[in-house]
């Protein structure tokens, strides 16, 4: 198994990554080798690393402006944060991940690929509030339901900035269920965006949430009585 782009998705990969495609293949190679060995990517996912992961994440860049600061929450194997850093050298990307074995992989990958504008932070999202500069964009993929995700991500987002959450078919239902919570967190009305519909057979579904205002952070209740 290697990280080369399968012929069937090569046109899409060339369109999305452009002259960064060789770098993207190097990251894909890391995912299907070290990523599998370290348990970051399941063995069954390796043969479809391009269709289900690399391209699925890369098309998110359609929604991100030039020279943006991006915080990727729960980065895991670097999806989507590392992929965005590979595809978009103009972005300043911070990968936030609490698990040591994952941050070790991410740090090694950042060094190996020479991603000078990418930083790895070992922490939970809530631990980064007030410590990281507020970001233009906060991204997350397969991390948590939308209400909890927004509670972690919006405090890391600048007012006027956006949370971009990669979701599946449940996107519209999650918006309907959690709209009131999002509003209390300072968000505007969320929307569903489809990315990559011009190049992918199955576009990436993204919930876009704009942080419209700051809200007071609730203190955690003390444990015990």
Image (cartoon, rainbow, N blue to C red):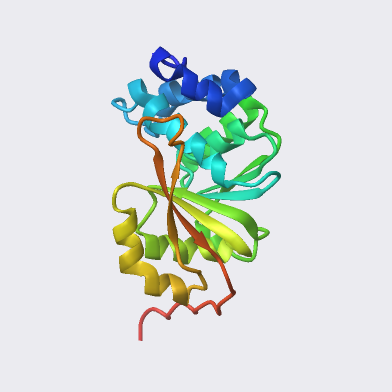
Q: In the displayed image of the protein, which residue is found farthest to the front?
A: 198
Q: Residue at left 42%, top 20%?
A: 9
Indicate whether 4 appears above or below 107. Answer: above
Q: Residue at left 59%, top 53%?
A: 137
**Quadrant of residue 150 within the rendered picture:** bottom left
Say which quadrant the N terminus sits in: top left
Indicate whether 178 appears above or below 85. Answer: below
Q: Quick check: can you spot residue 160?
A: yes
Q: Position of residue 6 (x, y in %)?
A: 41, 15
Q: Position of residue 61 (x, y in %)?
A: 56, 40
Taking depth in this image into account, of 72 and 213 the one nearest to the observer is: 213
Taking depth in this image into account, of 74 and 19 the one nearest to the observer is: 19
Q: Quick check: can you spot residue 36?
A: no
Q: In the displayed image of the protein, which residue is found farthest to the bottom?
A: 225
Q: Position of residue 222 (x, y in %)?
A: 42, 80
Q: Residue at left 42%, top 80%?
A: 221
**Quadrant of residue 178 within the rendered picture:** bottom left
Is 199 placed left or right of 171 in the picture?
A: right
Q: Position of residue 101 (x, y in %)?
A: 46, 38
Q: Residue at left 36%, top 81%?
A: 224
Is 41 placed left or right of 120 in the picture?
A: left
């Amino acid at each position: 198994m290697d990280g080369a782009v399968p012929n069937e998705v090569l046109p899409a990969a060339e369109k999305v990554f452009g002259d960064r495609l060789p770098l993207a293949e190097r990251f894909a190679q890391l995912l299907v080798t070290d990523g599998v060995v370290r348990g970051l990517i399941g063995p069954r996912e390796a043969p479809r690393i391009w269709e289900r992961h690399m391209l699925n994440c890369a098309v998110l860049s359609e929604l991100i402006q030039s020279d943006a600061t991006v915080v990727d929450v729960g980065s895991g194997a670097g999806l989507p944060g590392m992929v965005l850093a590979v595809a978009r050298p103009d972005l300043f990307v911070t990968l936030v991940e609490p698990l040591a074995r994952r941050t070790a992989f991410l740090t090694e990958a950042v060094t190996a690929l020479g991603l000078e504008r990418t930083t790895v932070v070992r922490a939970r999202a809530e631990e980064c509030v007030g410590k990281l500069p507020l970001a233009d964009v906060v991204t997350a993929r397969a991390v948590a339901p939308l209400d909890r995700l927004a509670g972690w991500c919006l405090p890391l987002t600048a007012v006027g900035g956006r949370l971009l959450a990669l979701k599946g078919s449940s996107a519209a239902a999650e918006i309907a269920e959690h709209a009131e919570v999002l509003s209390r967190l300072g968000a505007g009305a969320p929307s569903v965006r489809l990315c990559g519909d011009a190049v992918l057979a199955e576009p990436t579904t993204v919930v876009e949430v704009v942080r419209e205002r700051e809200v007071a952070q609730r203190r955690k209740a003390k444990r015990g009585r």
